[in-house]
Image: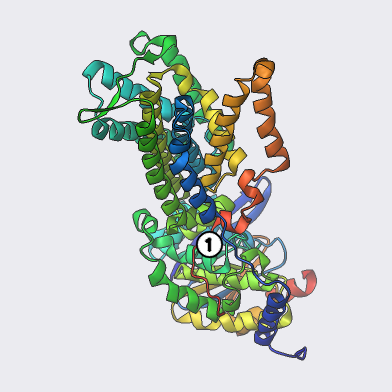
């Protein structure tokens, strides 16, 4: 040990080896493996399930809803914006492409999917401007209620609007086309949805790991502190919220094409809450976690609703599962494997020689 | 013209007059100490300068701009940096990332998204961590640092903003005498490019590093001048002998 009259320099330096000796830092990164394994499974699913078209449809549906899950994770998991209206952007984009198909007879992939993303982006941007960009920073509750109200109002509005099919929604949505090829339910649609999901996932992952992701990580811990650094915190939130709207919009369009139907229920608080559920169940802030959540919820509801004995009570069971997870494992399924450190992220260079 | 000109700043909390017509000038390149008994308005004044709250009346002019009603974000952009009294490092980010986060705050949003400055800033972040003796802890979480080290990290982060004026609210609070001594040494070199306003209870510390002192008492300026003059001021001696 060094003497007590040592200068502060020595005192400071002395602590370091002690800590290092007692607590060697294990930095196991788990997420890349989870992501890789998920990708492999996603690629072989169609081959395994080739006999069961109903399951291919289910799997495609899960991929599409995963976009909604990512959209919500961008808001809550990455930026700390509690949105209870993510389905609004999903649904409005779904309606938009259904109407373009019906009234303009246009359903080309290169035109309608970007349109849906633009609709989601602009609508979310509008909400962000209203909810986030005031002079005073809004509270989480204000934003949650604002988005919830938006989704609820939109659901009620389309339910009574004849032009968009009122309560029946829009059925017989024109098939998505690429030139002369038409995407019907099945393997081709599955791979289209998978490709788009991978693109969006890669984009979200890039964002999370960028210097912008560092700002978001700081914001989640102490918004006020970041304002004193000179960050326009609300602007950052507004931008990410708008991008989340874009992702939801893409999901809504694919949903509409895949189901051949879009209705008021696809834009209301019900589906919005389901998106929250995906994220909390799977593990918010990890991006892949919410996809796990989407898979779990959708597969579970598919299986449970098919068993006669529990048919009447399956929604209750479906509700209890996430309730249990949130109570006993608040970091979600992935929280079991992924450390806080990895979930939150590291942005600077690591020096192992230090 | 002074870097910071405070004229007639008052602030009232309900019935308590925390600041009452305070006038202070801070010149570029000087270390300016704010002292006074508890409740004399030191922290309130610092917060009015940093923008944590607004003054009820009076003006704060910084570097030629009236910032009396500017938001914290606008003040930070103008070159003001604040180290909070209670340490506000981001505990779940690494020490390195805390400094990087402060340093990259002038970057535009698209540049941040594309991570264009991550490499360019590495040398500066590393240099700052070396100066503040935190380089060995760069990969540890900020929340794992000792209290004194967190205070240093705070100062490093405040300096990472490349401010023209740094506001330090009790930087040596909770530090050991050795750590206080080191803190003084760490602050010395910044004088070349940055002025300092420092609120501190440790009069020895403040006497050692400051050029000028302002003594506040009950929200008013009791006296100001260079350190020698203040030490001899009978008014100040009376306050400090009777009420501290």
Q: Considering the numbered disc 1 on the image, is that residue within a helix, a strand or a loop?
A: loop
Where residue B91 sits: x, y (%)?
A: 62, 61
Label 1 chain ID: A
B227 or B173, nearer to the observer? B173
Q: Which residue is drawn at 57% across and 65% down?
A: B94
- Relative to A208, does residue A313 appear above or below in the rendering? above
Check the image and name the residue furthest to the front.
A51
B193 or A224, nearer to the observer? A224
| Residues packed near mark 1 inside 10 Å, few (<14), some (14 to 19) or many (20 plus) | many
Q: Which residue is drawn at 51% across and 42% down?
A: A73
Q: Residue at x 46, y 60 (%)?
A: B76
Quadrant, the C terminus of chain A: bottom right
Q: In this view, does A112 lie to the left or right of B216?
A: left
Inspect this view and state whether residue A23 appears.
yes
Image quadrant of residue B86?
bottom right
- Relative to B173, does residue A336 appear above or below in the rendering? above
Q: Residue at x 69, y 88 (%)?
A: A7
- Which residue is tagged 1? A346
Where residue A210 sits: x, y (%)?
A: 43, 57
Where residue B82 sits: x, y (%)?
A: 54, 64
A258 or A340, nearer to the observer? A258
Check the image and name the residue furthest to the left.
A179
Inspect this view and state whether residue B223 appears.
no
Q: Which colour scheme is used?
A: rainbow
- Relative to B39, does residue A189 appear above or below in the rendering? above
Image quadrant of residue A333?
top right
Where residue B43 sits: x, y (%)?
A: 63, 61
A183 or A19, nearer to the observer? A183
């Amino acid at each position: 040990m060094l003497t007590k009259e040592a200068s502060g320099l020595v005192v400071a330096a002395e602590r370091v080896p002690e800590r290092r000796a007692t607590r060697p830092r294990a930095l196991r990164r788990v997420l890349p493996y989870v992501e890789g394994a998920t990708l492999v499974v996603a690629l072989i699913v169609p081959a395994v399930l080739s006999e069961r078209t109903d399951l291919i449809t289910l799997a495609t549906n899960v991929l599409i809803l995963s976009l909604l899950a990512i959209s919500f994770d961008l808001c809550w998991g990455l930026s700390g914006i509690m949105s209870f209206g993510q389905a609004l952007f999903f649904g409005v984009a779904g309606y938009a492409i259904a109407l373009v198909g019906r009234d303009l007879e246009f359903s080309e992939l290169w035109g309608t999917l970007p349109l849906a993303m633009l609709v989601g982006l602009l609508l979310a941007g509008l909400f962000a401007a209203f909810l986030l960009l005031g002079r005073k920073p809004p509270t989480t509750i204000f934003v949650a209620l604002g988005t919830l109200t938006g989704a609820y109002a939109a659901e009620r509005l389309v339910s009574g609007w004849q032009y968009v099919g009122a309560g029946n929604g829009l059925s017989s949505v024109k098939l998505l086309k690429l030139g002369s090829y038409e995407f019907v339910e099945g393997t081709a649609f599955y791979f289209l949805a998978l490709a788009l999901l991978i693109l969006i996932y890669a984009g979200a992952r890039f964002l999370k790991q960028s210097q912008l992701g560092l700002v978001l990580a700081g914001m989640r811990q102490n918004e006020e502190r970041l304002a004193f650094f000179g960050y326009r915190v609300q602007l950052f939130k507004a931008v990410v919220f708008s991008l989340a709207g874009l992702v939801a919009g893409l999901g809504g369009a694919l949903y509409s094409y895949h189901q051949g139907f879009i209705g008021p229920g696809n834009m209301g608080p019900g589906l919005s809450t389901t998106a929250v559920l995906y994220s909390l169940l799977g593990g918010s802030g990890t991006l892949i976690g919410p996809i796990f959540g989407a898979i779990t919820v959708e597969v579970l509801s598919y299986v449970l609703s098919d068993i006669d004995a529990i048919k009447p009570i399956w929604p209750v069971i479906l509700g209890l599962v996430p309730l249990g997870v949130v109570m006993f494992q608040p970091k979600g399924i992935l929280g079991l494997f992924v450390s806080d450190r990895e979930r939150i992220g590291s942005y600077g260079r690591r020096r192992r020689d230090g | 013209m002074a870097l910071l000109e405070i004229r007639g700043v008052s602030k009232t909390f309900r019935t308590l007059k925390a600041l009452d017509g305070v006038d202070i000038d801070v010149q570029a390149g000087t270390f300016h100490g704010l002292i006074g008994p508890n409740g004399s308005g030191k922290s309130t004044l610092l917060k009015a300068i940093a923008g944590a709250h607004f003054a009820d009346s009076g003006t704060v002019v910084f570097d030629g701009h009236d910032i009396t009603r500017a938001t914290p974000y606008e003040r930070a952009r103008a070159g003001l940096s604040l180290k909070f009294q209670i340490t506000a490092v981001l505990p779940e980010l690494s020490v390195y990332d805390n400094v990087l986060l402060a340093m990259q705050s002038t970057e535009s949003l698209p540049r941040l998204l594309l991570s264009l400055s991550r490499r360019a800033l590495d040398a500066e972040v590393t240099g700052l961590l070396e100066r503040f003796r935190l380089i060995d802890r760069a990969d540890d979480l900020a929340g794992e640092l000792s209290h004194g080290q967190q205070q240093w990290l705070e100062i490093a982060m405040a300096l990472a903003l490349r401010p023209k004026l740094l506001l330090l609210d009790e930087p040596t609070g909770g530090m050991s005498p050795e750590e206080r001594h080191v803190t003084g040494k760490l602050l010395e070199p910044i004088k070349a490019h940055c002025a300092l306003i420092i609120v501190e209870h440790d009069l020895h510390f403040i006497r050692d590093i400051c050029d000028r002192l302002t003594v506040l008492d009950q929200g008013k300026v009791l006296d100001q001048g260079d350190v020698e003059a203040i030490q001899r001021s009978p008014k100040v001696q009376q306050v400090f002998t009777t009420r501290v």
